[in-house]
């Protein structure tokens, strides 16, 4: 509520309220630019990096005109612009807070004098359960984020950055494994996750269910609609704008949750000691960590003695598959539901 509750319609003083959390990030980046030289850094060679919610937040930063000149490279793991919501969705999320506090739908101004603790408790109630983390996030407010992220990118109205970006093959597996409600999807579950977008996801789930188990169908559909589709849409827009983007896919399955969400992190950070990794995992960690470091230092993830990693082009669809043997693969197709909007979560009531 403090970072992303839309109050622009309350008064001009609150024009940026739906993106205050985003402006915090931008303020931090401005501080970096002004001070990084004092720490031995180069203000003209700043890389931002985020995973999951962090990747989605930084994608919103990237397409905001406020971020121009603040960083030159961008690493995104499992996240894109899919969490930027429209103003109506932001207002309906706010309405749930108003109802929780027994305030009228036209009484948003009353929120300005509510104790912080009361707002936090109301937020806790509204955001509990499946999909609760979808209610608040960056907003297409016409100010901090001026227009559609994809069109903004295609029109070259974002900084001329270099991008390393990708997803995990089975993102949904982590969520299925850790939340019993997701193991057999129904309309209620999907409405909580996707809001008014849920009928499109449910239709795809029913089709997938005809050729797969409920669990595997759920993994595939959640992966496609929550992560893959949006990442590849953004990669396409970036490539159209002439921005170099290196795409990867994490395919390694010998982790606690397979090639699920966040399972790439220990390998990217090389955070497990050599003693805790067998030779196969150690090699994968070396490959990923060294590629990320090379990108940060050189602006290119290619490293010596590894397969050449080309930039992503829509007509070629070449991505680096990180697996037991890491290699460049060519995707025959990329999932896309043309009717699905740019935002994962949309509210209309």
Image (cartoon, rainbow, N blue to C red):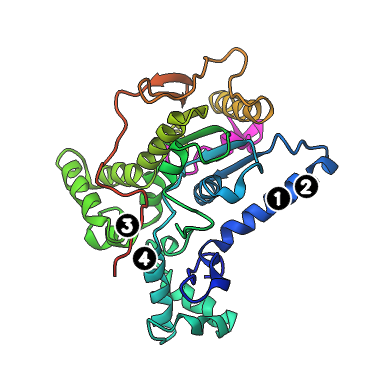
Hey, which residue is sitting farthest top in the picture? 305
Q: Relative to 212, is 301 above or below? A: above
Residue 46 shows in the view? yes
Say whether disc 4 or disc 3 marks the residue closer to the N-terminus: 4
Q: Rounded to the nearest whole Å, what is the CA distance between mark 3 and mark 2?
A: 40 Å
Q: Nearer the viewer, mark 1 or mark 3?
A: 1
What residue sits right under mark 3 in the picture? 194
The reply to whether the C-beta atoms of the residues labelled 2 and 1 are less than 8 Å apart is yes
Q: Relative to 141, is 226 above or below? A: above
Whether residue 323 appears in magenta in the rendering, the answer is no
**Which region is colored magenta?**
259-277
What residue sits right under mark 2 in the picture? 34
Label 4 Cα neighbours within 10 Å, binned few <14 / some 14-19 / many ≥20: some
Say whether disc 3 or disc 2 marks the residue closer to the N-terminus: 2
Q: Nearer the viewer, mark 4 or mark 3?
A: 4
Q: Rounded to the nearest whole Å, what is the CA distance between mark 4 and mark 2?
A: 37 Å
Q: Secondary structure at mark 1?
A: helix
In this picture, residue 164 sits left or right of residue 181: right
Q: Secondary structure at mark 3?
A: helix
What residue sits right under mark 4 in the picture? 88
What residue sits right under mark 1 in the picture? 30
């Amino acid at each position: 509520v403090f970072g992303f509750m839309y109050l622009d319609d309350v008064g001009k003083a609150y024009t940026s309220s739906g993106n205050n959390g985003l402006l915090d990030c931008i303020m931090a980046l401005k501080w970096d630019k002004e001070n990084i030289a004092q720490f031995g850094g180069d203000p003209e060679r700043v890389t931002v990096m985020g995973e999951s919610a962090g990747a989605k937040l930084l994608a919103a930063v990237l397409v905001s005109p406020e971020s121009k000149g603040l960083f030159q490279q961008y690493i995104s793991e499992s996240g894109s612009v899919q969490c930027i919501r429209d103003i109506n969705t932001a207002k309906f999320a706010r309405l749930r807070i108003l109802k929780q506090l027994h305030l009228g739908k036209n009484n948003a101004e009353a929120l300005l004098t509510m104790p912080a603790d009361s707002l936090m408790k109301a937020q806790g109630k509204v955001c509990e359960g499946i999909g609760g983390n979808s209610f608040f996030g960056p907003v297409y407010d016409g100010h901090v984020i001026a227009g559609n992220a994809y069109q903004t990118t295609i029109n070259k109205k974002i900084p001329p950055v270099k991008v390393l970006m990708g997803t995990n093959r089975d993102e949904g597996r982590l969520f299925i494994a850790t939340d019993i409600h997701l193991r057999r999807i129904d309309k209620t579950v999907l409405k909580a996750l996707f809001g008014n977008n849920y009928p499109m996801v449910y239709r795809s789930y029913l089709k997938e269910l005809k050729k797969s188990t409920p669990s595997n169908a759920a993994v595939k559909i959640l992966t496609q609609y929550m992560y893959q589709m949006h990442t590849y849409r953004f990669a396409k827009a970036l490539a159209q704008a002439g921005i170099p983007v290196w795409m990867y896919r994490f395919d390694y399955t010998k982790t606690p949750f397979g090639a699920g969400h966040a399972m790439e992190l220990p390998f990217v950070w090389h955070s497990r000691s050599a003693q805790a990794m067998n030779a196969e995992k150690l090699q994968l960690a070396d490959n990923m960590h060294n590629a990320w470091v090379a990108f940060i230092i050189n602006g290119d993830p290619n490293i010596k003695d590894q397969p050449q990693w080309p930039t992503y082009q829509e007509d070629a669809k070449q991505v680096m598959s990180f697996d037991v043997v890491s290699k460049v693969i060519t995707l025959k197709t990329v999932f896309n539901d043309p009717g699905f909007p740019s935002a994962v979560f949309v509210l209309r009531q």
